[in-house]
Image (tube, rainbow, N blue to C red):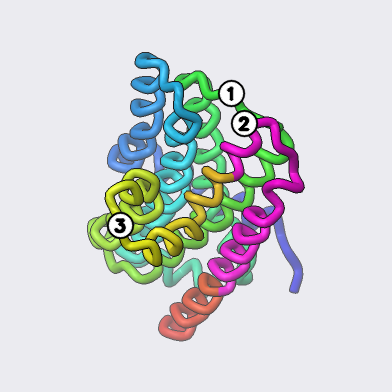
Amino acid sequence: MTFSMKRVNAIFIKDWKDLQRNSYILFTAAIPLFFAAWLGRIGADSAILASYPVNLALVIAGAFIQAAMVAEEKEKNTLRGLLLSPANTLEILVGKSALSAVMTIVIITGSILLSGYRVPSLPVFAVSILLGLIIYLAIGTILGLLSRTVMESSIIGMPVLVVFGMASMVKTTIENEVLVKVIDYLPSEQLNHIWVRLGEGEGLSAVSGNMAVLLLWAAASFFATMLIYRKNSMDYS
């Protein structure tokens, strides 16, 4: 199976043109920036709170927007043409994720600058962001493939926003230790653990376990995306 960057680029350019006409996605993408600007204004001193816009950017730009873009293809019935095109599975998945990935990185960078968050250990931080990006883009693709319309993707994506984007806040109100332990294994919580420990001056060895959990999440979400994508391909064949 050959991989063609020309096909990936063609999908990316098509998504970019569609995005420019979609005010809903552009407004949604700006939410982490507004929140980061607010945190920067009040001067958040908590490491978890200061990094919250970064996690929110991953959830909203990575998963929410990705879901909306994939669902829009289904709603306009253009996904069928994409699935039946010469592009292979990997080219389509990379192409459909490329714009969301670029937007997420831009929004994360903007959130860091606006909130005044001090990035600890840039190389390890970058690797954690990459793993988080893979996880949330895969989750967003799954939500989009399971939705029939953009509105439906927003509805089924809301629990994802609550569970993955606000887990740290929700966890403080939960008394059940088992449920708290489960929440601790969510990607957002693993990322928080990594960033807090790095901020305390600890190195890669201290966060290797968290990285391993993120790697498992990335592998599981990627394979789940492949399975659901292939099911959609067979439905259209």
Magenta-highlighted residues: 194-223
Give the CA distance from mark 1 to mark 2: 8 Å
> Position of 135 compared to 65: left or right?
right
Q: Amino acid at mark 1?
A: Arg
> Position of 197 compared to 22: left or right?
right
Callout 1 secondary element: loop
Q: Locate residue 181, reporting x and y percent.
A: 45, 61
Q: Residue at x 34, y 42 (%)?
A: 25
Q: Locate residue 162, reporting x and y percent.
A: 31, 52
Q: Residue at x 41, y 16 (%)?
A: 43
Callout 3 secondary element: loop
Mark 3 or 1, which is nearer the eye? 3
Whether pointer 1 and pointer 2 mark residues with C-beta atoms closer than 8 Å, the reply is yes
Q: Residue 101 bears which disc, if any?
A: none
Would you name the residue on which mark 1 appears?
118
Q: Residue 175 bears which disc, if any?
A: 3
Give the CA distance from mark 3 to mark 1: 32 Å
First of labels 3, 2 by sequence position? 3
Quarter of the image where one finds residue 105: top right
Would you name the residue on which mark 2 appears?
199
Q: Amino acid at mark 2?
A: Gly
First of labels 3, 1 by sequence position? 1
